[in-house]
Image (tube, grey):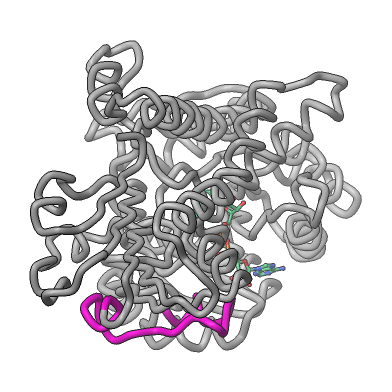
Amino acid sequence: MKLAIIGTGYVGLITGSCFAEFGYETVCIDKNQERVNELKNSKCPFYEPGVEDLLDKHLNKTKLLSFSSSLSESIKDADIIFITVGTPSKRFEGEADLTYVWNVAEEISENIHKYCVVVTKSTVPVGTTKKVKKIIAKKISEKNFDVVSNPEFLREGSAIDDFMRPDRVVIGCENKKSDKIMKELYRPLYLIETPIISTTIESSEIIKYASNSFLATKISFINQVADLCEEVGANVQDVAKGMGIDRRIGNKYLHAGPGYGGSCFPKDVKAFIKTAENNNLDLSILSAVDQFNEERVNSIVNKIISKSNLKKGDKVTLLGLSFKPNTDDVRDSTSLKIAKLLIDKGIIIKSYDPEAMENAKLENSELVLCKDAYKACEATSVIVIGTEWNEFRALNFFKIKNNRENLYIFDLRNIYNPEELKDLGYKYFGTGK
Ligand SMILES: NC(=O)c1ccc[n+]([C@@H]2O[C@H](COP(=O)([O-])OP(=O)(O)OC[C@H]3O[C@@H](n4cnc5c(N)ncnc54)[C@H](O)[C@@H]3O)[C@@H](O)[C@H]2O)c1
Protein backbone atom coordinates (compact mmCIF):
# COMPACT_ATOMS: atom_id res chain seq x y z
CA MET A 1 0.00 0.00 0.00
CA LYS A 2 1.37 3.44 -0.95
CA LEU A 3 0.46 6.44 1.18
CA ALA A 4 0.55 10.18 0.57
CA ILE A 5 0.20 12.63 3.46
CA ILE A 6 -0.60 16.27 2.64
CA GLY A 7 0.68 18.72 5.27
CA THR A 8 3.76 18.04 7.39
CA GLY A 9 2.76 19.74 10.64
CA TYR A 10 2.58 17.87 13.94
CA VAL A 11 -0.09 15.48 12.68
CA GLY A 12 1.13 14.95 9.11
CA LEU A 13 4.75 14.40 10.01
CA ILE A 14 4.01 11.99 12.86
CA THR A 15 1.45 10.12 10.73
CA GLY A 16 3.91 9.81 7.86
CA SER A 17 6.86 8.73 10.01
CA CYS A 18 4.80 6.20 11.96
CA PHE A 19 3.22 4.66 8.85
CA ALA A 20 6.77 4.29 7.46
CA GLU A 21 7.65 2.57 10.74
CA PHE A 22 4.72 0.19 10.11
CA GLY A 23 6.37 -0.61 6.77
CA TYR A 24 4.38 1.48 4.28
CA GLU A 25 5.95 3.45 1.46
CA THR A 26 4.95 6.98 2.42
CA VAL A 27 5.41 10.36 0.81
CA CYS A 28 4.76 13.52 2.84
CA ILE A 29 3.90 16.68 0.94
CA ASP A 30 4.04 20.28 2.09
CA LYS A 31 3.67 23.52 0.16
CA ASN A 32 6.29 25.08 2.45
CA GLN A 33 9.47 24.41 0.44
CA GLU A 34 11.79 25.42 3.29
CA ARG A 35 10.11 22.88 5.58
CA VAL A 36 10.42 20.16 2.92
CA ASN A 37 14.14 20.91 2.49
CA GLU A 38 14.73 20.62 6.25
CA LEU A 39 12.79 17.37 6.41
CA LYS A 40 14.78 15.87 3.53
CA ASN A 41 17.82 16.36 5.80
CA SER A 42 16.06 14.52 8.68
CA LYS A 43 15.55 17.82 10.47
CA CYS A 44 12.22 18.16 12.25
CA PRO A 45 10.90 21.75 12.04
CA PHE A 46 9.50 21.54 15.58
CA TYR A 47 10.45 19.88 18.87
CA GLU A 48 8.84 16.49 19.31
CA PRO A 49 10.71 13.70 21.13
CA GLY A 50 11.78 10.80 18.88
CA VAL A 51 10.78 12.20 15.47
CA GLU A 52 14.26 12.84 14.15
CA ASP A 53 15.29 9.23 14.85
CA LEU A 54 12.31 7.99 12.84
CA LEU A 55 13.08 10.44 10.03
CA ASP A 56 16.68 9.33 9.87
CA LYS A 57 15.72 5.64 9.90
CA HIS A 58 13.13 5.83 7.15
CA LEU A 59 14.71 8.48 4.95
CA ASN A 60 18.19 7.04 4.96
CA LYS A 61 17.98 3.35 5.89
CA THR A 62 14.64 1.79 4.92
CA LYS A 63 13.98 4.56 2.35
CA LEU A 64 10.25 4.09 2.95
CA LEU A 65 9.76 7.79 3.65
CA SER A 66 10.16 10.71 1.28
CA PHE A 67 9.24 14.39 1.21
CA SER A 68 8.06 16.56 -1.62
CA SER A 69 6.54 19.94 -2.37
CA SER A 70 4.84 18.65 -5.52
CA LEU A 71 1.37 17.36 -4.74
CA SER A 72 0.63 16.37 -8.35
CA GLU A 73 3.73 14.17 -8.66
CA SER A 74 3.40 12.64 -5.19
CA ILE A 75 -0.22 11.53 -5.10
CA LYS A 76 -0.47 9.89 -8.51
CA ASP A 77 0.49 6.39 -7.27
CA ALA A 78 -1.06 6.68 -3.80
CA ASP A 79 -3.64 4.15 -2.60
CA ILE A 80 -4.56 6.33 0.38
CA ILE A 81 -4.23 10.12 0.54
CA PHE A 82 -4.38 11.79 3.96
CA ILE A 83 -5.33 15.43 4.39
CA THR A 84 -3.46 16.70 7.47
CA VAL A 85 -3.43 20.46 6.90
CA GLY A 86 -4.32 22.99 9.59
CA THR A 87 -7.92 23.94 10.45
CA PRO A 88 -7.44 27.09 12.58
CA SER A 89 -10.22 29.30 13.94
CA LYS A 90 -11.58 31.98 11.66
CA ARG A 91 -10.60 35.29 13.22
CA PHE A 92 -13.27 36.58 15.64
CA GLU A 93 -15.82 33.95 14.58
CA GLY A 94 -14.73 30.73 16.24
CA GLU A 95 -15.74 28.71 13.20
CA ALA A 96 -13.11 26.39 11.71
CA ASP A 97 -11.33 27.94 8.74
CA LEU A 98 -11.34 25.18 6.12
CA THR A 99 -9.53 27.07 3.37
CA TYR A 100 -6.53 24.72 3.45
CA VAL A 101 -8.78 21.65 3.27
CA TRP A 102 -10.77 22.99 0.29
CA ASN A 103 -7.57 23.94 -1.55
CA VAL A 104 -6.12 20.47 -1.04
CA ALA A 105 -9.39 18.84 -2.17
CA GLU A 106 -9.27 20.88 -5.39
CA GLU A 107 -5.67 19.87 -5.99
CA ILE A 108 -6.43 16.21 -5.33
CA SER A 109 -9.32 16.32 -7.79
CA GLU A 110 -6.94 17.42 -10.53
CA ASN A 111 -4.36 14.74 -9.87
CA ILE A 112 -6.04 11.39 -9.20
CA HIS A 113 -5.42 8.86 -11.95
CA LYS A 114 -6.52 5.60 -10.30
CA TYR A 115 -8.84 4.47 -7.49
CA CYS A 116 -7.78 5.80 -4.10
CA VAL A 117 -9.16 6.60 -0.67
CA VAL A 118 -9.04 10.25 0.43
CA VAL A 119 -8.93 10.56 4.21
CA THR A 120 -9.59 13.64 6.34
CA LYS A 121 -7.26 13.29 9.32
CA SER A 122 -7.33 17.00 10.11
CA THR A 123 -9.94 17.91 12.72
CA VAL A 124 -12.90 19.01 10.58
CA PRO A 125 -16.51 19.95 11.43
CA VAL A 126 -19.23 17.46 10.63
CA GLY A 127 -20.09 17.58 6.95
CA THR A 128 -16.58 18.52 5.77
CA THR A 129 -15.51 15.09 4.52
CA LYS A 130 -18.64 14.83 2.37
CA LYS A 131 -17.93 18.32 0.99
CA VAL A 132 -14.41 17.16 0.12
CA LYS A 133 -16.10 14.33 -1.77
CA LYS A 134 -18.29 16.81 -3.67
CA ILE A 135 -15.27 18.90 -4.67
CA ILE A 136 -13.37 15.87 -5.96
CA ALA A 137 -16.47 14.47 -7.67
CA LYS A 138 -16.65 17.56 -9.88
CA LYS A 139 -13.62 16.19 -11.74
CA ILE A 140 -13.45 12.46 -10.89
CA SER A 141 -16.12 9.77 -11.14
CA GLU A 142 -17.36 8.66 -7.70
CA LYS A 143 -16.44 5.08 -8.66
CA ASN A 144 -12.78 6.05 -8.73
CA PHE A 145 -12.39 7.27 -5.17
CA ASP A 146 -13.86 7.07 -1.69
CA VAL A 147 -13.68 9.50 1.20
CA VAL A 148 -13.09 8.50 4.81
CA SER A 149 -12.93 10.38 8.11
CA ASN A 150 -10.09 9.18 10.36
CA PRO A 151 -9.48 11.82 13.05
CA GLU A 152 -6.20 11.94 14.91
CA PHE A 153 -5.96 11.88 18.71
CA LEU A 154 -2.20 12.21 19.28
CA ARG A 155 -0.90 14.68 21.85
CA GLU A 156 2.10 16.87 21.19
CA GLY A 157 4.99 15.83 23.44
CA SER A 158 4.07 12.13 23.28
CA ALA A 159 2.92 12.05 19.66
CA ILE A 160 4.82 9.00 18.45
CA ASP A 161 3.74 6.82 21.34
CA ASP A 162 0.15 8.04 21.00
CA PHE A 163 0.15 7.18 17.31
CA MET A 164 1.79 3.78 17.73
CA ARG A 165 -0.30 2.81 20.79
CA PRO A 166 -3.58 4.70 20.48
CA ASP A 167 -6.55 4.20 22.82
CA ARG A 168 -8.66 3.74 19.69
CA VAL A 169 -8.72 4.28 15.94
CA VAL A 170 -11.89 5.87 14.56
CA ILE A 171 -12.84 5.17 10.96
CA GLY A 172 -15.86 6.86 9.38
CA CYS A 173 -16.75 5.28 6.02
CA GLU A 174 -19.56 5.19 3.48
CA ASN A 175 -18.98 1.68 2.18
CA LYS A 176 -17.36 -1.70 2.89
CA LYS A 177 -14.60 -1.25 0.31
CA SER A 178 -13.04 1.79 1.96
CA ASP A 179 -13.65 0.39 5.46
CA LYS A 180 -11.71 -2.75 4.49
CA ILE A 181 -8.82 -0.72 3.08
CA MET A 182 -8.61 1.38 6.25
CA LYS A 183 -8.72 -1.68 8.50
CA GLU A 184 -5.94 -3.26 6.44
CA LEU A 185 -3.91 -0.06 6.88
CA TYR A 186 -4.22 -0.24 10.67
CA ARG A 187 -3.59 -4.00 10.81
CA PRO A 188 -0.24 -3.50 12.61
CA LEU A 189 -2.27 -2.21 15.57
CA TYR A 190 -4.39 -5.38 15.83
CA LEU A 191 -1.44 -7.09 17.52
CA ILE A 192 -1.77 -4.72 20.47
CA GLU A 193 -5.56 -5.10 20.36
CA THR A 194 -6.31 -1.46 19.61
CA PRO A 195 -10.09 -0.95 19.42
CA ILE A 196 -11.12 0.09 15.92
CA ILE A 197 -14.38 2.06 15.87
CA SER A 198 -16.05 1.77 12.47
CA THR A 199 -18.83 4.24 12.03
CA THR A 200 -20.40 6.78 9.68
CA ILE A 201 -18.42 9.75 8.45
CA GLU A 202 -20.61 12.16 10.43
CA SER A 203 -20.20 10.25 13.71
CA SER A 204 -16.46 10.00 13.20
CA GLU A 205 -16.13 13.76 12.67
CA ILE A 206 -18.18 14.43 15.79
CA ILE A 207 -16.25 11.90 17.93
CA LYS A 208 -13.14 14.06 17.55
CA TYR A 209 -14.80 17.35 18.55
CA ALA A 210 -16.84 15.75 21.33
CA SER A 211 -13.69 14.13 22.77
CA ASN A 212 -11.63 17.33 22.82
CA SER A 213 -14.58 19.34 24.11
CA PHE A 214 -15.17 16.84 26.90
CA LEU A 215 -11.53 17.02 28.02
CA ALA A 216 -11.66 20.83 27.92
CA THR A 217 -14.83 20.66 30.03
CA LYS A 218 -13.05 18.55 32.65
CA ILE A 219 -10.28 21.15 32.80
CA SER A 220 -12.61 24.15 33.16
CA PHE A 221 -14.65 22.23 35.71
CA ILE A 222 -11.70 21.44 37.97
CA ASN A 223 -10.44 25.02 37.56
CA GLN A 224 -13.76 26.40 38.81
CA VAL A 225 -13.65 23.91 41.69
CA ALA A 226 -10.06 25.11 42.35
CA ASP A 227 -11.29 28.69 42.72
CA LEU A 228 -13.89 27.53 45.22
CA CYS A 229 -11.23 25.54 47.11
CA GLU A 230 -9.10 28.66 47.42
CA GLU A 231 -12.02 30.60 48.88
CA VAL A 232 -12.99 28.01 51.47
CA GLY A 233 -9.59 26.62 52.47
CA ALA A 234 -9.81 23.28 50.66
CA ASN A 235 -7.12 21.67 48.51
CA VAL A 236 -8.07 20.99 44.89
CA GLN A 237 -5.41 18.30 44.54
CA ASP A 238 -7.03 16.29 47.32
CA VAL A 239 -10.44 16.97 45.82
CA ALA A 240 -9.31 15.83 42.35
CA LYS A 241 -7.76 12.70 43.85
CA GLY A 242 -10.93 11.91 45.75
CA MET A 243 -13.01 12.40 42.61
CA GLY A 244 -10.67 10.78 40.10
CA ILE A 245 -10.33 7.52 41.96
CA ASP A 246 -13.96 6.89 41.03
CA ARG A 247 -13.64 4.97 37.76
CA ARG A 248 -16.74 6.66 36.38
CA ILE A 249 -14.86 9.97 36.58
CA GLY A 250 -11.20 9.02 36.07
CA ASN A 251 -8.18 10.98 37.26
CA LYS A 252 -6.98 12.34 33.90
CA TYR A 253 -7.46 16.00 32.98
CA LEU A 254 -8.37 16.89 36.55
CA HIS A 255 -5.27 19.00 37.20
CA ALA A 256 -6.14 22.55 38.18
CA GLY A 257 -4.04 25.19 36.45
CA PRO A 258 -4.06 28.34 34.36
CA GLY A 259 -6.56 26.93 31.84
CA TYR A 260 -6.22 24.92 28.66
CA GLY A 261 -4.28 26.21 25.66
CA GLY A 262 -2.50 24.80 22.64
CA SER A 263 -3.33 24.36 19.01
CA CYS A 264 -6.41 22.16 19.52
CA PHE A 265 -8.67 22.58 22.58
CA PRO A 266 -9.40 26.34 22.30
CA LYS A 267 -10.16 26.24 18.58
CA ASP A 268 -11.99 22.90 18.65
CA VAL A 269 -14.29 23.94 21.50
CA LYS A 270 -15.16 27.16 19.65
CA ALA A 271 -15.72 25.33 16.35
CA PHE A 272 -17.98 22.74 18.03
CA ILE A 273 -20.09 25.52 19.59
CA LYS A 274 -20.34 27.11 16.13
CA THR A 275 -21.41 23.81 14.53
CA ALA A 276 -24.22 23.55 17.07
CA GLU A 277 -25.25 27.17 16.41
CA ASN A 278 -25.33 26.50 12.67
CA ASN A 279 -27.78 23.71 13.47
CA ASN A 280 -29.91 25.96 15.71
CA LEU A 281 -28.68 24.24 18.85
CA ASP A 282 -27.02 25.70 21.90
CA LEU A 283 -24.04 23.79 23.32
CA SER A 284 -24.35 26.00 26.39
CA ILE A 285 -22.12 23.82 28.55
CA LEU A 286 -19.27 24.40 26.12
CA SER A 287 -19.94 28.13 25.87
CA ALA A 288 -19.41 28.31 29.64
CA VAL A 289 -16.26 26.17 29.39
CA ASP A 290 -14.86 28.42 26.66
CA GLN A 291 -15.77 31.72 28.33
CA PHE A 292 -14.37 30.70 31.71
CA ASN A 293 -11.15 29.54 30.08
CA GLU A 294 -10.79 32.80 28.12
CA GLU A 295 -11.20 34.85 31.30
CA ARG A 296 -9.02 32.68 33.49
CA VAL A 297 -5.70 34.25 32.45
CA ASN A 298 -7.03 37.67 33.49
CA SER A 299 -7.99 36.44 36.96
CA ILE A 300 -4.60 34.74 37.34
CA VAL A 301 -2.74 37.89 36.36
CA ASN A 302 -4.86 39.94 38.78
CA LYS A 303 -4.06 37.45 41.54
CA ILE A 304 -0.31 37.64 40.82
CA ILE A 305 -0.36 41.45 40.81
CA SER A 306 -2.46 41.89 43.95
CA LYS A 307 -0.78 39.22 46.11
CA SER A 308 2.75 40.39 45.30
CA ASN A 309 2.01 44.14 44.98
CA LEU A 310 3.56 44.30 41.54
CA LYS A 311 4.18 47.74 40.10
CA LYS A 312 5.18 49.09 36.70
CA GLY A 313 8.87 48.42 36.10
CA ASP A 314 9.00 45.37 38.43
CA LYS A 315 10.54 42.16 37.14
CA VAL A 316 8.78 38.78 37.10
CA THR A 317 10.28 35.38 36.28
CA LEU A 318 8.12 33.19 34.06
CA LEU A 319 9.21 29.56 33.83
CA GLY A 320 7.82 27.79 30.77
CA LEU A 321 6.39 29.33 27.60
CA SER A 322 5.11 26.36 25.59
CA PHE A 323 1.45 25.46 26.09
CA LYS A 324 2.55 22.23 27.77
CA PRO A 325 5.81 20.36 28.46
CA ASN A 326 7.78 18.46 25.81
CA THR A 327 6.79 20.69 22.92
CA ASP A 328 7.98 23.99 21.48
CA ASP A 329 4.43 24.82 20.36
CA VAL A 330 3.27 28.18 21.74
CA ARG A 331 -0.05 28.38 19.88
CA ASP A 332 -2.65 29.69 22.39
CA SER A 333 -0.17 29.15 25.24
CA THR A 334 -1.55 30.39 28.56
CA SER A 335 2.00 31.26 29.68
CA LEU A 336 2.40 33.60 26.72
CA LYS A 337 -1.00 35.18 27.40
CA ILE A 338 -0.01 35.78 31.04
CA ALA A 339 3.30 37.27 29.86
CA LYS A 340 1.51 39.62 27.47
CA LEU A 341 -0.96 40.86 30.09
CA LEU A 342 1.88 41.55 32.54
CA ILE A 343 4.03 43.24 29.88
CA ASP A 344 1.05 45.43 28.94
CA LYS A 345 1.03 46.62 32.56
CA GLY A 346 4.68 47.67 32.31
CA ILE A 347 6.14 44.61 34.03
CA ILE A 348 9.37 43.11 32.74
CA ILE A 349 9.20 39.36 32.08
CA LYS A 350 12.38 37.33 32.43
CA SER A 351 11.70 33.90 31.07
CA TYR A 352 13.19 30.53 30.30
CA ASP A 353 11.77 27.53 28.44
CA PRO A 354 13.80 24.45 27.46
CA GLU A 355 12.50 24.41 23.86
CA ALA A 356 9.97 27.14 23.09
CA MET A 357 11.97 30.37 23.42
CA GLU A 358 12.50 30.87 19.70
CA ASN A 359 8.79 30.51 18.92
CA ALA A 360 7.84 32.63 21.94
CA LYS A 361 10.12 35.47 20.87
CA LEU A 362 8.35 35.56 17.49
CA GLU A 363 5.06 36.04 19.35
CA ASN A 364 6.31 38.60 21.87
CA SER A 365 9.58 40.39 21.23
CA GLU A 366 9.48 42.07 24.66
CA LEU A 367 10.20 38.86 26.56
CA VAL A 368 13.62 38.86 28.18
CA LEU A 369 14.89 35.34 27.51
CA CYS A 370 17.45 33.74 29.81
CA LYS A 371 19.81 30.82 29.35
CA ASP A 372 18.38 28.75 32.20
CA ALA A 373 15.84 28.81 35.01
CA TYR A 374 18.37 30.10 37.55
CA LYS A 375 19.36 33.08 35.38
CA ALA A 376 15.65 33.84 34.87
CA CYS A 377 15.18 33.93 38.67
CA GLU A 378 18.05 36.39 39.29
CA ALA A 379 17.00 39.88 40.42
CA THR A 380 13.26 39.21 40.41
CA SER A 381 11.05 38.83 43.47
CA VAL A 382 8.17 37.00 41.78
CA ILE A 383 8.48 33.57 40.16
CA VAL A 384 5.60 32.17 38.09
CA ILE A 385 5.69 28.50 37.06
CA GLY A 386 3.67 28.50 33.86
CA THR A 387 4.54 25.15 32.24
CA GLU A 388 5.40 21.99 34.16
CA TRP A 389 8.56 20.93 32.31
CA ASN A 390 10.38 18.17 34.23
CA GLU A 391 13.41 20.38 34.73
CA PHE A 392 11.27 22.83 36.75
CA ARG A 393 10.12 20.13 39.16
CA ALA A 394 13.23 20.01 41.33
CA LEU A 395 14.77 23.47 41.20
CA ASN A 396 17.09 24.43 44.04
CA PHE A 397 14.97 27.14 45.66
CA PHE A 398 17.49 27.58 48.48
CA LYS A 399 20.05 28.65 45.89
CA ILE A 400 17.49 30.82 44.08
CA LYS A 401 16.54 32.61 47.30
CA ASN A 402 20.14 33.52 48.00
CA ASN A 403 19.31 35.12 51.38
CA ARG A 404 16.77 37.49 49.81
CA GLU A 405 13.46 38.32 51.52
CA ASN A 406 9.91 38.77 50.22
CA LEU A 407 10.09 36.31 47.34
CA TYR A 408 6.82 35.09 45.85
CA ILE A 409 6.13 31.87 43.98
CA PHE A 410 2.99 31.38 41.88
CA ASP A 411 2.98 27.66 41.18
CA LEU A 412 0.24 27.64 38.54
CA ARG A 413 0.72 23.90 37.90
CA ASN A 414 0.89 22.78 41.55
CA ILE A 415 4.22 20.99 41.15
CA TYR A 416 5.73 22.02 44.49
CA ASN A 417 5.02 21.22 48.12
CA PRO A 418 3.83 24.53 49.64
CA GLU A 419 5.17 23.71 53.11
CA GLU A 420 8.73 23.13 51.85
CA LEU A 421 8.80 26.45 50.02
CA LYS A 422 7.22 28.30 52.94
CA ASP A 423 9.88 26.79 55.22
CA LEU A 424 12.51 28.27 52.92
CA GLY A 425 10.86 31.67 53.42
CA TYR A 426 8.92 32.03 50.17
CA LYS A 427 5.39 33.33 49.94
CA TYR A 428 3.81 30.44 48.06
CA PHE A 429 0.58 30.52 46.03
CA GLY A 430 -0.57 27.37 44.28
CA THR A 431 -3.76 26.88 42.26
CA GLY A 432 -6.79 25.88 44.28
CA LYS A 433 -5.06 25.31 47.60
N1 LIG B 1 -1.25 19.41 16.72
C1 LIG B 1 -1.92 18.45 17.36
O1 LIG B 1 -1.56 18.05 18.47
C2 LIG B 1 -3.13 17.81 16.72
C3 LIG B 1 -3.66 16.64 17.27
C4 LIG B 1 -4.77 16.05 16.67
C5 LIG B 1 -5.36 16.66 15.58
N2 LIG B 1 -4.85 17.83 15.08
C6 LIG B 1 -5.48 18.43 13.90
O2 LIG B 1 -4.70 18.09 12.76
C7 LIG B 1 -4.69 19.16 11.81
C8 LIG B 1 -3.27 19.59 11.53
O3 LIG B 1 -2.72 20.12 12.73
P1 LIG B 1 -1.16 20.46 12.85
O4 LIG B 1 -0.95 20.95 14.24
O5 LIG B 1 -0.38 19.31 12.35
O6 LIG B 1 -1.08 21.68 11.79
P2 LIG B 1 0.17 22.55 11.38
O7 LIG B 1 -0.37 23.92 11.17
O8 LIG B 1 1.30 22.32 12.33
O9 LIG B 1 0.63 21.96 9.96
C9 LIG B 1 -0.13 22.05 8.79
C10 LIG B 1 0.81 21.90 7.59
O10 LIG B 1 0.03 21.84 6.40
C11 LIG B 1 0.73 22.52 5.37
N3 LIG B 1 -0.19 22.86 4.28
C12 LIG B 1 -1.20 23.75 4.29
N4 LIG B 1 -1.81 23.79 3.06
C13 LIG B 1 -1.15 22.90 2.27
C14 LIG B 1 -1.29 22.49 0.92
N5 LIG B 1 -2.24 23.01 0.11
N6 LIG B 1 -0.45 21.56 0.44
C15 LIG B 1 0.52 21.03 1.23
N7 LIG B 1 0.71 21.39 2.52
C16 LIG B 1 -0.13 22.31 3.03
C17 LIG B 1 1.34 23.71 6.08
O11 LIG B 1 2.42 24.27 5.35
C18 LIG B 1 1.77 23.10 7.42
O12 LIG B 1 3.11 22.62 7.37
C19 LIG B 1 -5.59 20.24 12.42
O13 LIG B 1 -6.89 20.07 11.96
C20 LIG B 1 -5.54 19.94 13.91
O14 LIG B 1 -6.67 20.40 14.60
C21 LIG B 1 -3.74 18.40 15.62
Q: Is residue 64 visible?
A: no
Q: Find the magenta span and give its range.
A: 357-377
Position of 208 with respect to 154 (left or right) is right
Q: Position of residue 324 (x, y in %)?
A: 39, 56
Query: 38 above or below 155?
Result: below
Rendered-image quadrant of the C terminus? top left
Q: Residue furthest right?
A: 138
Q: Position of residue 212 (x, y in %)?
A: 53, 35
Position of 76 with respect to 325 (left or right) is right
Quadrant in which residue 146 is drawn:
top right
Report if residue 361 lies within the magenta region: yes
Report if residue 313 lies within the magenta region: no
Q: Position of residue 148 (x, y in %)?
A: 63, 38
Residue visible at 34% across and 11% down in the picture: 248
- Nearer to me, 78 or 87: 87
Position of 112 with respect to 237 (left or right) is right
Q: Position of residue 263 (x, y in %)?
A: 55, 55
- Nearer to me, 409 or 238: 409
Query: 389 above or below 312?
Result: above
Residue visible at 86% across and 29% down in the picture: 278
Residue visible at 55% across and 83% down in the picture: 366
Residue visible at 83% across and 28% down in the picture: 277
Quadrant location, ligand no. 1: bottom right
Q: Is residue 49 visible?
A: yes
What is the count of numbered marks?
0
- Nearer to me, 85 or 239: 239
Query: 249 above or below 307?
Result: above
Quadrant in which residue 406 is drawn:
bottom left
Query: 176 above or below 158?
Result: above
